[in-house]
Image (spheres, rainbow, N blue to C red):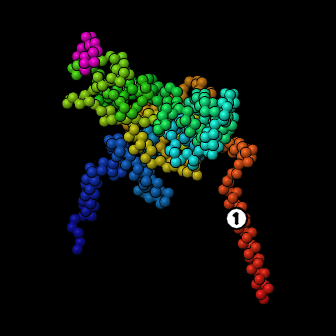
């Protein structure tokens, strides 16, 4: 039976029905607006939560990546949309075919960056640490060696660590530990990079059960970046956060913590009032703090805020909601430091130490960092070496602070301008190659083995010896079989 009405009308009804269906679906899953809408999808993206923005990005990325299998109108459109949206958010997709970096190099970079290292669990020591290190550490000398006998410059592995200023500064501490414990100075030429990591732990641990050991003197690399950024651009950072509608007491407290300590984790933040309240004045009087010059509603002097926080009494100025409950820092945004040039691709740089320089770092809202920036990372691996194959990069290489996806929610600042720092000049004097250092280490260990008649197991040599021996055995059996067969005839 023929359908009633014109073909145009039927098509219009179908389109309206589909549109209504899409809008209902979008109301339940807002991120689908970016995919369904052909106009205004960038504004749709701006209005999404960070989690939904990540979902839209992931869906578009998956569709765009399918172009390699079969190019269709759908995935071509998705690829174009993705590039437009990312550019509007300040990003661009990047593909890599860079130099792979050994996992030990990555660990060293992370140690320099965080200023800490985790203690090896007891069950992993035999597997992770070399037999040379374990034996010489377990059997100290009878007589304490002289300081001059410990030549760190002769150590192939230490050369890898000395590329970083933070490790050059603790060489004396490591040497003092070895001298105090009467460790044979020859250990330096035999130690692997992992052994040196453990030596740092042994030298700086305060308790036997301490799992995370802090070794950097003074402020850490990442905290120094945050502190310097807040000291130079703090006012602009405040304005950006206030425009997001965040409580001004949280905003000023967070930026103050960044300016003073370089810290940025909201769970550790003490949110203070900005003006004297009845509760604050009462709490100060209870602590016998002179309040005669303080008046209700007046700004709290910054020097008072800082001094009470330093004395672990910031709670006396605690900001409260209308019900009198203290504001909890973890209820507000936290931040993380992002490497603009990836750590695992630091082999592309003149020195791997450069990857932790301030101009390569960016302070990002933690949710944007984890739920968006790294959402579609692709990493290649070859044995114990890694490298990115796909990753998001900032369009503007000088981006230093990000609180959202809109243009006014990211801030550019160039840390690289000006003359080379003393640290940079010194780092350039310590550039070495990982592979060459490991070759020299192998030669040192082989010489030690020969001198001490150590029986060293070499799996490659043993396998080849076994294969050759098995081949000769099979060949001999084959000849005997043929000889018997001929004689039998």
**Of 418 and 184, the residue lying toward us:** 184
x and y, in percent, of residue 377 in the image: 47, 47
Q: Is 88 on the left or on the right of 135, as rendered?
A: left
Magenta region = 283-297
User: Residue, x 36% and y 51% (percent of image)?
Assistant: 35
Q: Is 312 on the left or on the right of 432, as rendered?
A: left
**Which residue is under mark 1?**
467
User: Residue, x 50% and y 39% (percent of image)?
Assistant: 118
Whether the magenta-drawn stretch holds residue 277 is answered as: no
x and y, in percent, of residue 295 in the image: 24, 14
Badge 1 marks a residue whose secondary structure is: helix
Q: Quadrant of the C terminus?
A: bottom right
Residue farthest toward the top in the current orientation of the protein: 293
Q: Is 306 on the left or on the right of 69, as rendered?
A: left
- Vertical comparison of 383 with 105: above or below: below
Residue farthest toward the front in the current orientation of the protein: 142
- Asked whether residue 398 appears in the rendered view, the answer is no
């Amino acid at each position: 039976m023929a359908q009633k009405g014109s073909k145009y009308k039927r098509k219009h009804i179908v389109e309206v029905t589909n549109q209504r269906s899409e809008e209902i679906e979008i109301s339940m899953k807002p991120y689908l607006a970016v995919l369904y809408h052909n106009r205004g999808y960038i504004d749709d993206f701006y209005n999404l939560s960070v989690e939904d923005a990540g979902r839209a990005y992931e869906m578009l990325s998956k569709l765009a990546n399918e172009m390699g299998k079969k190019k269709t109108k759908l995935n071509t459109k998705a690829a174009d949309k993705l590039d437009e949206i990312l550019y509007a958010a300040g990003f661009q997709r990047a593909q890599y075919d860079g130099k792979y970096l050994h996992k030990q190099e990555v660990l060293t970079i992370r140690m320099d960056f965080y200023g800490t290292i985790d203690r090896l669990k007891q069950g992993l020591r035999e597997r992770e640490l070399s037999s040379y290190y374990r034996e010489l550490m377990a059997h100290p000398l009878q007589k304490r060696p002289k300081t001059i006998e410990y030549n760190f410059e002769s150590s192939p592995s230490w050369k890898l660590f000395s590329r970083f200023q933070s490790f050059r500064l603790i060489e004396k501490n490591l040497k003092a530990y070895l001298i105090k414990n009467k460790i044979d100075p020859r250990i330096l030429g035999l130690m692997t990079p992992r052994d040196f990591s453990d030596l740092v732990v042994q030298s700086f641990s305060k308790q036997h059960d301490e799992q995370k050991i802090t070794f950097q003197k003074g402020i850490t690399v990442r905290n120094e970046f945050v502190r310097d950024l807040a000291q130079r651009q703090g006012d602009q950072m405040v304005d950006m956060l206030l425009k997001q509608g965040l409580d001004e007491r949280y905003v000023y407290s967070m930026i103050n913590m960044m300016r003073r300590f370089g810290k940025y984790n909201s769970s550790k933040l003490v949110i203070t009032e900005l003006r004297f309240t009845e509760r604050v004045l009462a709490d100060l009087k209870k602590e016998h703090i002179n309040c005669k010059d303080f008046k209700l509603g007046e700004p709290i002097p910054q020097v008072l805020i800082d001094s009470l926080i330093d004395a672990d009494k910031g709670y006396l100025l605690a900001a409260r909601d209308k019900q009198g409950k203290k504001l909890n820092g973890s209820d507000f945004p936290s931040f993380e430091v992002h490497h603009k040039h990836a750590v695992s691709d630091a082999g592309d740089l003149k020195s791997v130490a450069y990857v932790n320089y301030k101009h390569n770092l960016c302070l990002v809202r933690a949710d944007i960092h984890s739920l968006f920036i790294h959402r579609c990372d692709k990493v290649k691996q070859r044995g114990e070496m890694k490298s990115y194959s796909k990753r998001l990069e900032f369009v503007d290489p000088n981006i230093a602070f990000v609180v959202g996806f809109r243009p006014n929610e990211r801030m550019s600042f160039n840390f690289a301008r000006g003359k080379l720092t003393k640290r940079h000049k010194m780092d350039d004097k310590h550039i070495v190659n990982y592979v060459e250092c490991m070759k020299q280490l192998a030669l040192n260990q082989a010489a030690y083995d020969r001198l001490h008649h150590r029986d060293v197991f070499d799996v490659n040599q043993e396998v080849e010896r076994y294969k050759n021996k098995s081949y000769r055995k099979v060949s001999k059996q084959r000849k005997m079989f043929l000889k018997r067969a001929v004689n039998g005839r």
